[in-house]
């Protein structure tokens, strides 16, 4: 238990990783064909049978699976193991529609916790550490996954769950937590409270493992400075198991994917064509060791880049970048993929409100983009030259993120038209010219 780093797996050669993936993919395809009628019918509709899948080179032949499939098959339709073999479910929040329910055998849980243990070891965790798990417990995967991973490493585990900040800080100080696992926004909130209460000199945190929501590099630097730790990213989806699908190491230059359990692809979100390494596109995952709920070619909607550039930590598993947005909210402006979520992160990171509007237009043969954002009442009443400075600052920040110029206009509070209580985020006037 003293060291859960698994060099025989995490530093395996590319040839060994591929051999594992080839063998496990074939077995998983056979499993879903023999045990899941929904999958069998889906594969038949695409003219694919198990015998057609002999290695990862044949992965492209399989149909994609989307969240719509998971909702259509809810609750038991995508199970590939008898219910009597399952020992747990986890579930999404259901905020965007019908909940997604994922099933786990005991072996599924063991392997998931292995992945989370690797994430803890990757940030320097050992059995000498005290891990404070401040992700939510219950149906949400965050708490359960990191809790189990902490146990696998042999850490003292504080199963705090989310919220109750007073208690979080008490145990953090009294028990000397050295690693914190939570969302980045909650980490920032804890940092504010620590400084307000003058507890900074009592905090012993050395690392934070943060996930479950988008966060910027600027936010990472701020959290690191405020809490005196190194902040690491972790990625996962309930549909695949939970946190631990991929994780950052001490290099902090992308998240290593656990390739002995998951095959990653990057596709063109419009055509579905597989893109070469290094190109930006939609992330697709195939789980190859799950028993109860394996997913083949699951479209995550997350946009990122894959890279096999050698890592100083010695791990050989492919890295994924921090997600850059989602394929279902993409605009193409001047040939560049632009995501409203990218713009929103910049605005929020600069202390502005989430009430904004993106206006895309075409002048002659050239596209233009303008971002209108509401200023807070206090700031808007400030001097006009201050507003101009803010506009210039946001313009520069957006150009750094998007790679193109976007005009920024600060507008009065509550001046952006709402529709059914929400601001209309995107107005694409180019569509008017195409009708």
Image (tube, grey):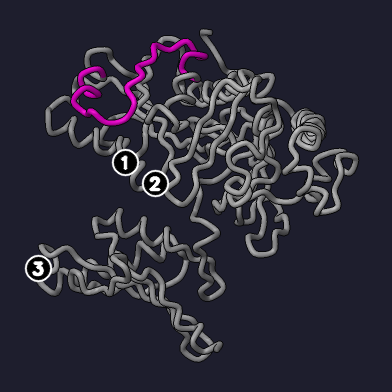
Query: Going from the N terminus, do you reach mark 3 or mark 2 first?
Result: 2
- Which residue is nearer to you in this view: 45 or 75? 75
- From the top left corner, tell me how far across and down residue 352 is, in percent: 24, 59
Residue 316 showing in the rendered view = no
The part of the chain drawn in magenta is 149-171
Q: CA distance from mark 3 to mark 2?
A: 29 Å
Q: Is residue 156 magenta?
A: yes
Instruction: Work out which residue is located at the far bottom of the displayed protein and give it.
Output: 364
Residue under the image location 89 percent in, 44 percent down: 52
- Which residue is nearer to you in this view: 127 or 169? 169
Q: Which mark is residue 185?
A: 1
Instruction: Work out which residue is located at the far right of the displayed protein and give it.
Output: 51
Residue under the image location 64 percent in, 56 percent down: 279
Q: Quadrant of residue 49?
A: top right
Q: In terms of secondary structure, where does tag 3 sit?
A: loop
Q: Which mark is residue 382?
A: 3
Query: Would you name the residue on which mark 2 appears?
Result: 215
Q: Locate residue 317 relative to residue 427 in the image: left or right.
A: right
**Could you tell me if the residues under marks 2 and 1 are in contact, i.e. CB atoms within 8 Å?**
yes
Q: In terms of secondary structure, where does tag 1 sit?
A: helix
- From the top left corner, tell me how far across and down residue 416 is, in percent: 26, 73
């Amino acid at each position: 238990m003293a060291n859960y780093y698994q060099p025989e797996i995490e530093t395996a050669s590319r040839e060994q990783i591929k051999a594992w993936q080839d063998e496990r993919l074939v077995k998983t395809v056979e499993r879903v064909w023999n045990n899941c009628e929904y999958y069998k019918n889906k594969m038949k509709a695409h003219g694919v049978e198990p015998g057609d899948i002999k290695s990862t080179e044949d992965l492209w032949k399989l149909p994609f699976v989307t969240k719509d499939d998971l909702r259509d098959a809810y609750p038991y339709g995508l199970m590939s193991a008898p219910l009597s073999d399952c020992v747990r479910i986890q579930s999404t929040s259901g905020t965007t529609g019908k909940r997604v329910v994922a099933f786990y055998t005991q072996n599924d849980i063991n392997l998931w916790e292995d992945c989370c243990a690797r994430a803890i070891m990757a940030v320097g965790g050992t059995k000498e550490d005290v891990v404070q798990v401040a992700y939510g417990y219950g149906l949400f995967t965050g708490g359960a996954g990191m809790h189990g991973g902490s146990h696998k490493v042999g850490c003292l585990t504080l199963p705090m769950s989310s919220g109750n900040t007073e208690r979080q800080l008490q145990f953090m100080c009294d028990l000397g937590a050295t690693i914190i696992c939570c969302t980045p926004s909650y980490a920032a909130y804890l940092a504010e409270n620590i400084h307000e209460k003058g507890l900074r000199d009592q905090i012993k945190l050395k690392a934070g493992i943060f996930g479950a929501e988008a966060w910027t590099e600027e936010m990472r630097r701020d959290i690191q400075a405020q809490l005196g730790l190194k902040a690491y990213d972790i990625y996962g989806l309930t549909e695949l198991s939970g946190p631990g699908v991929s994780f950052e190491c001490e290099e902090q230059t992308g998240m290593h994917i656990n390739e002995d359990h998951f095959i990653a692809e990057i596709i063109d979100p419009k055509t579905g064509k597989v893109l070469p390494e290094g190109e930006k596109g939609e992330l697709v995952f195939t789980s190859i060791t799950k028993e109860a709920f394996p997913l083949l070619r699951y479209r995550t909607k997350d946009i990122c880049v894959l890279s096999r550039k050698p890592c100083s930590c010695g791990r050989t598993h492919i890295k994924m970048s921090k997600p850059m947005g989602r394929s279902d909210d993409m605009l193409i402006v001047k040939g560049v993929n632009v995501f409203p979520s990218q713009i929103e992160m910049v605005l929020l990171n600069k202390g502005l409100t989430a009430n904004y509007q993106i206006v895309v237009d075409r002048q002659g043969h050239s596209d233009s983009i303008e971002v209108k954002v509401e200023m807070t009442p206090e700031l808007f009443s400030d001097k006009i030259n201050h507003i101009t400075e803010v506009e210039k600052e946001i313009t520069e920040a957006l150009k750094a993120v998007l790679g193109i110029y976007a005009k920024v206009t600060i507008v009065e509070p509550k001046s952006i038209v709402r529709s059914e209580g929400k601001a209309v985020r995107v107005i694409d006037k180019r569509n008017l010219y195409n009708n």
